[in-house]
Image: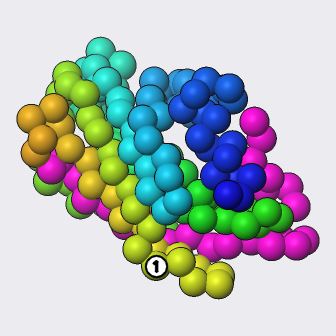
Amino acid sequence: MSKALENLQKLISGEISPPPIAKLLGLKFVHIEYGRSVFEMECDTEKHANPMGTIHGGILCDLADVAMGTAYNSTLDDGETFTTVELKINFLKPVCNEKLTAKAEVKKRGKSVGLVHCDIFNESGKLVAYLTSTCMTLRGEEAKGHEVKN
C-alpha cells in the first residue's frame, strides 16, 4: 500500500486531521480505497445558498473536487503528487437542505494524466450532479511544493 493511500485511510480513522477545506465545508470522509472515495456533506441553505435559495453550484464542485482528488491521490506512488487541470460539472437537480453523497472513481490512470468521475446523490438517492476531472501526476522537481500536508 502506498503512503498516500495509507494516509488517506488514516483520515477516516481520525488519526490524521482533515484538510482545511474539508473542515470549512463540513465534509465527512466515508470510504477510501485504491482509486475510489466516498464523501458526505450536510448542505444548509443558511450557509451554502445562492441568490435563488438553493445550494450554490460551487459547493457541489468543492465536494466533488475533494472526492475526485482523494480517489486520484489514492493511486499515487511515493514521491508523486498531482494537480487538477480540468473539472466539468453537469447540474441535474437543485439541492436545498439535505445530505449529499459524492462517489468518485478513477476511470483511467495514465503515466501523466488521469480521468476521474464523480456522481453526487441527494438523500433520496437521486443523482443531482455528474462530474469529471482531469488530473496531472507530478514527479520530481514538479512535485516539490505540492506535497500533501497532514
- The verdict on residue 146 being magenta is yes
Q: Measuring 31% from the left and 24% from the top, which residue is drawn there?
A: 42
Where's residue 112, x and y in %? 65, 82
Q: Measuring 56% from the left and 70% from the top, which residue is drawn there?
A: 135
Residue farthest toward the top in the current orientation of the protein: 46
Residue farthest toward the front in the current orientation of the protein: 1
Q: Which quarter of the picture shows residue 50?
A: top left
Q: Measuring 65% from the left and 84% from the top, which residue is drawn there?
A: 111
Provide the secondary structure element on which disc 1 rests: strand
Does residue 68 appear in this view?
no
- Drawn side of residue 74 relative to residue 143, left or right: left
Where's residue 16, x and y in %? 69, 29
Is 4 or 116 nearer to us in this picture? 4
- The verdict on residue 41 being magenta is no
Residue on which the image places disc 1? 108
- Drawn side of residue 99 relative to residue 7, left or right: left
- Drawn side of residue 13 relative to residue 62, left or right: right
Q: Measuring 12% from the left and 41% from the top, which residue is drawn there?
A: 125
Where's residue 136, x and y in %? 62, 73
Q: In this view, does 140 lie above or below 40?
A: below
- Drawn side of residue 10 relative to residue 37, left or right: right
Does residue 78 appear in this view?
yes
Task: Write down the region rendered in magenta.
Answer: 127-150
Q: Which quarter of the picture shows residue 63?
A: top left
Is 120 or 48 nearer to us in this picture? 120
Q: In this view, does 78 lie above or below 38?
A: below
Where's residue 109, x and y in %? 53, 77
Q: In this view, does 79 lie above or below 109?
A: above
Q: Quadrant of the N terminus?
A: bottom right
Colour convention of the picture: rainbow
